[in-house]
Amino acid sequence: MDFSQLVATKITELMKERNLNVNQLSKLTGIYRSTLNMFLKRKNKTIRLENLLYICEAFNIKLSDFFSDERFDECEAHDWRNKVKN
């Protein structure tokens, strides 16, 4: 799984754990619902670090806790690597 997909997956899992939908997360973070939807539905493959910090605050976790998931140890930035090769 690439890095961006894993970030989206992790956010979705945290939302499910806390019984939150995108509208609720939007209200908690101040991030536009459309911005969250575009990222979570993979129509946009990037997320601003500031937005990820707001998301972590909404989940009452530190950014380091977000990335402590072992799956991040194995993820790769496929798109970037492909651009470098070409």
Image (cartoon, rainbow, N blue to C red):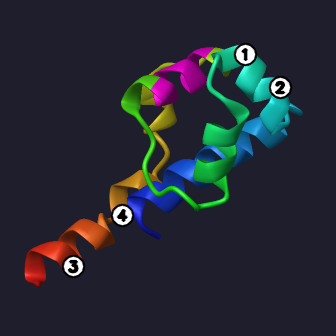
> Going from the N terminus, do you reach mark 2 or mark 3 first?
2
Which amino acid, mark 2?
Gln
Along the horizontal axis of the image, is 55 left or right of 81? right
Judged by depth in the image, the label closer to the viewer, 4 or 3, is 3
Which residue in the structure is indicated by mark 1? 28
Numbered disc 1: secondary structure: helix
Which residue in the structure is indicated by mark 2? 24
Point out the stretch of residues depicted in magenta: 51-57
Frontmost residue, 16 versus 44: 44
- Give the distance between the C-alpha atoms of the residues marked 1 and 4, in whole angstroms: 30 Å
- Give the distance between the C-alpha atoms of the residues marked 2 and 4, in whole angstroms: 31 Å
- Give the distance between the C-alpha atoms of the residues marked 1 and 2, in whole angstroms: 6 Å
52 magenta-colored? yes
Question: Who's the residue at 60% across and 47% down the image?
Answer: 10
Which amino acid, mark 3?
Asn
> Going from the N terminus, do you reach mark 2 or mark 4 first?
2
Which amino acid, mark 4?
Glu
Along the horizontal axis of the image, is 86 left or right of 79? left
- Give the distance between the C-alpha atoms of the residues marked 3 and 1, in whole angstroms: 36 Å
- Give the distance between the C-alpha atoms of the residues marked 4 and 3, in whole angstroms: 17 Å
Numbered disc 2: secondary structure: helix
Furthest residue toward right: 19
Which residue in the structure is indicated by mark 4? 74
Which residue in the structure is indicated by mark 3? 82
Judged by depth in the image, the label closer to the viewer, 1 or 4, is 1
